[in-house]
């Protein structure tokens, strides 16, 4: 679970280990694989019209960007415990909200940074409008946040529990 404030990202040990493993793979075996692809494409001839070469170079650029992002994230990371089940919304928690006016219209999401996004559950950043609105609220409280069109939306906090991977 992550929480970003003042360039410090709080991570559980599990999240830290997962991101570190990704960095090690991208910095080692993945770099070797992409270098091999580039070399093979280079041998095919004219680089100006070589789609395989350009695709491999683009992939390399994306990979190197991810390496830089992970390096910076892990350099500024602090490893800590998952939040306690106190009933207060905090990063690293699965939050259930009901939209104002329709108690049956609910949403479950993980309040965490993109780095910890999972395909299992929708993830909202603590810095997103919804994340900012619900962060620090207690179960049963109402929260308000700004929609992209500038209007305000209200939600009620139904549940807040620590995320279990």
Image: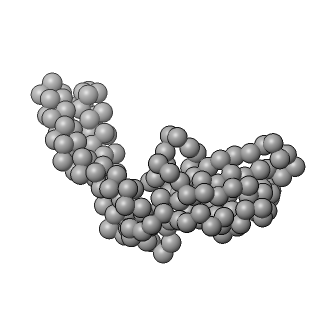
In the image, farthest residue toward the bottom? 6
User: Who's the residue at 34% across and 63% down the image?
Assistant: 74
Q: Is residue 9 left or right of residue 36?
A: right
Query: In the rendering, at what x and y percent does residue 9 appear?
Result: 44, 67
State the image quarter where residue 135 is shown: bottom right
Residue situated in front as seen by the camera: 125 or 135? 135
Query: In the rendering, at what x and y percent does residue 15 appear?
Result: 39, 56
In the image, farthest residue toward the top? 44
State the image quarter where residue 40 is shown: top left
The correct choice, above or below, for 37 with respect to 161 in the image is above
The correct choice, above or below, for 105 with respect to 70 in the image is above
Q: Is residue 122 left or right of residue 129?
A: left
Query: In the rendering, at what x and y percent does residue 25 appear?
Result: 24, 46
Q: Is residue 108 left or right of residue 24?
A: right
User: Who's the residue at 60% across and 57% down the image?
Assistant: 161
The correct choice, above or below, for 69 with respect to 138 in the image is above
Q: Is residue 106 left or right of residue 37?
A: right
User: Who's the residue at 78% across and 56% down the image?
Assistant: 155
């Amino acid at each position: 679970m992550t929480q970003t404030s003042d360039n410090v990202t709080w991570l559980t040990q599990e999240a830290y280990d997962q991101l570190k493993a990704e960095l090690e793979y991208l910095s080692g075996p993945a770099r070797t694989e992409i270098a091999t692809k580039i070399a093979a494409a280079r041998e095919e001839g004219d680089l100006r019209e070589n789609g395989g070469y350009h695709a491999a170079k683009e992939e390399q650029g994306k990979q190197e960007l991810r390496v830089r992002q992970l390096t910076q994230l892990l350099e500024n990371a602090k490893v800590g415990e998952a939040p306690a089940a106190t009933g207060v919304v905090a990063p690293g928690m699965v939050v259930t909200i009901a939209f104002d006016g329709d108690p049956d219209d609910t949403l479950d999401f993980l309040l965490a940074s993109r780095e910890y996004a999972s395909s299992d559950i929708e993830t909202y950043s603590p810095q997103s409008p919804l994340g900012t609105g619900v962060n620090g609220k207690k179960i049963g409280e109402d929260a308000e946040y700004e929609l992209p069109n500038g209007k305000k939306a209200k939600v009620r906090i139904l549940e807040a529990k620590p995320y279990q991977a």
